[in-house]
Image (spheres, rainbow, N blue to C red):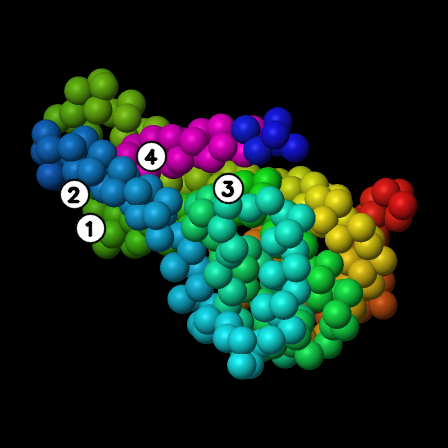
């Protein structure tokens, strides 16, 4: 487990570094295309470092605001509070995560934050209404495991940064289309190469960023499931919960493609999947429920 935690921390640093480089080159390309002169690289660096800093420190607030979550209270969510309190005994976290609730009929949950000292667990009202005590315990243990394993840092940062890059690429493409590009005859070879790299990244970075986001998400779900069983000693609760979540027909209204990987199961439902055995693909945000349940049964 400590090896995975260390690996997650390193991956987070690498992802942020790559993001700064990619955004710097994209903004540099834009500044040159808009004829902003020699300050282009300075503007690009300030913009990329500032956006990376904001994503690291405010990713949890951005995600909670996007799904319209409210803080959980003992008066309204007593069962939820009690289960999390009991999990803290075995979870060995330095601080109890803040609890939030989203008003939505789909049963789902996610964890976010930059580290165990600044962590959040968020569940939907559908989860509270449709799951029994042990099923809810299994889901909360899964989310606490993401916190314990430092998955939340990777998933939150990647979600915000990928979403930002996709938005930036869309804005930039519109600006370049309407504003036109700078005449490259007056550029030196160094600028021309950097601009070419920036243009390539502008086109391909949303695709590569999304694929990286999805691959990281699928890999971490299995580890969080296994760690949840260590916390509860009850794989049947999580297995039953996954079956209910997978079969629920509702779609989470506040979810979006940038944050879908953070949930315990995909918040989106496809009509073509009904009644079929689902398999994960390169574009899947999660491994298939069948594969996760099989892995959990092998633990028993």
Q: Can residue 132 be seen in this view?
A: yes
Residue visible at 77% across and 49% down in the picture? 229
Q: In the structure shown, which secondary structural element does the residue marked by tag 4 occupy?
A: helix
Residue 180 spot, x, y in % from top left: 21, 46
Mark 1 vs 4, N-terminal side = 4
Residue segment shown in magenta? 7-25
Mark 1 to mark 3 CA distance (whole Å)? 36 Å
Q: Which mark is residue 51?
A: none
Disc 2 target residue = 34
What residue sits right under mark 4 in the picture?
20
- List the residue tagged with mark 1: 179
Q: Can you identify the residue that label 3 sits on?
A: 154
Q: Where is residue 168 in the image (x, y as percent from the top left)?
A: 33, 49
> Would you identify the image quadrant in which residue 178 lies?
bottom left
- In contact (CB < 8 Å): disc 2 and disc 3: no
Q: Which-is-in-front pick, marks 2 and 3?
A: 3
Query: Where the N terminus falls, by quadrant?
Result: top right
Which circle's residue, 2 or 1, is located before the other in the chain?
2
């Amino acid at each position: 487990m400590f090896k995975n935690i260390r690996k997650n921390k390193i991956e987070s640093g690498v992802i942020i570094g790559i993001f700064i480089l990619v955004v710097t080159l994209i903004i540099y390309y834009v500044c040159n295309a808009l004829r902003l002169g020699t300050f282009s690289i300075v503007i690009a660096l300030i913009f990329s470092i500032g956006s990376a800093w904001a994503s690291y420190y405010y990713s949890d607030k951005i995600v909670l605001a996007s799904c319209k979550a409210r803080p959980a209270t003992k008066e309204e969510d007593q069962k939820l509070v009690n289960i999390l309190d009991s999990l803290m005994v075995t979870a060995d976290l330095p601080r109890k995560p803040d609890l939030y609730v989203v008003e939505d009929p789909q049963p789902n949950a996610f964890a976010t934050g930059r580290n165990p000292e600044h962590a959040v667990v968020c569940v939907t009202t559908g989860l509270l209404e449709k799951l029994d005590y042990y099923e809810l315990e299994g889901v909360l243990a899964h989310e606490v495991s993401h916190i314990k394993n430092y998955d939340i840092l990777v998933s939150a940062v990647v979600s915000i940064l990928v979403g930002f890059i996709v938005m930036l690429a869309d804005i930039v493409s519109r600006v370049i289309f309407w504003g036109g590009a700078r005449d490259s005859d007056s550029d030196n070879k160094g600028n021309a190469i950097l601009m070419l790299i920036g243009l390539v990244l502008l086109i391909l970075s949303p695709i590569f960023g999304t694929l990286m986001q999805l691959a990281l998400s699928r890999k971490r779900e299995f580890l969080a499931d296994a760690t949840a069983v260590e916390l509860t000693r009850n794989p049947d609760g999580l297995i039953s919960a996954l079956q209910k979540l997978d079969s629920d027909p509702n779609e989470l209204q506040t979810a979006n493609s940038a944050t879908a990987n953070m949930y315990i199961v995909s918040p989106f439902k496809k009509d073509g999947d009904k009644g079929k055995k689902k398999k994960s693909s390169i574009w899947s945000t999660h491994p298939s429920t069948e594969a996760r349940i099989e892995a959990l049964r092998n633990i028993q």
